[in-house]
Amino acid sequence: MPKIDIADPSVPDGALATRQECADFARITTTSWDRLVAMGKAPAKVTPDGVWPRWKVGHVRAWSEGRTAAGVDVTKKE
């Protein structure tokens, strides 16, 4: 499966992204991504338990826009 670039506007909001793709987009580690998801500070996965976790691209984009609007630097590695 080809890697999704969440920042690419040609990728539809309904596309599914992996945790690595989400972490890459947020410029954080996958461990930090998992921690943010567990704390409810990042979008919840849309796949059921027992399936490789995936997030809707539109949810991740909206979350990122909210963080940027709140003054959180999404370009800095956490």
Image (cartoon, rainbow, N blue to C red):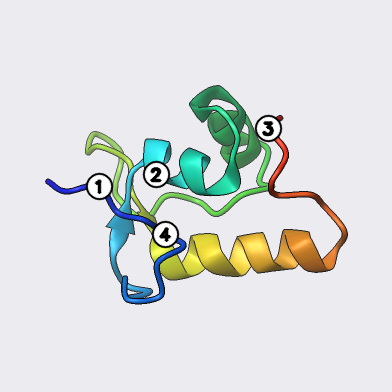
Crowding around mark 1 (Cα neighbors within 10 Å: few <14, some 14 to 19, many 20+) is: few
> As shown in the figure, which amino acid type bears the numbered disc 4?
Ile
Marks 1 and 2, how far apart at CA: 7 Å
Dot 4 or dot 3: first in sequence order is 4
Looking at the image, do the residues carrying marks 1 and 2 touch, with CB atoms under 8 Å apart? yes
On the image, the x and y values in percent for residue 78 come to 71, 30
Crowding around mark 4 (Cα neighbors within 10 Å: few <14, some 14 to 19, many 20+) is: many
Looking at the image, do the residues carrying marks 4 and 3 touch, with CB atoms under 8 Å apart? no
Looking at the image, do the residues carrying marks 4 and 2 touch, with CB atoms under 8 Å apart? yes
Say which mark, if any, is on residue 21.
2
> As shown in the figure, which amino acid type bears the numbered disc 2?
Glu
> As shown in the figure, which amino acid type bears the numbered disc 3?
Lys
> As shown in the figure, which amino acid type bears the numbered disc 1?
Lys
Residue under circle 1?
Answer: 3
Depth check: give the residue in front, 9 or 30. 9
Marks 4 and 3, how far apart at CA: 17 Å
Marks 2 and 3, how far apart at CA: 14 Å
Crowding around mark 3 (Cα neighbors within 10 Å: few <14, some 14 to 19, many 20+) is: few
Q: Secondary structure at mark 2?
A: helix
Q: Secondary structure at mark 3?
A: loop
Q: Secondary structure at mark 4?
A: loop
Q: Residue at x 24, y 34 (%)?
A: 50
On the image, the x and y values in percent for residue 57 come to 41, 63
Residue under circle 3?
Answer: 77
73 relative to 20, above or below? below
Marks 3 and 1, how far apart at CA: 20 Å
Say which mark, if any, is on residue 6.
4
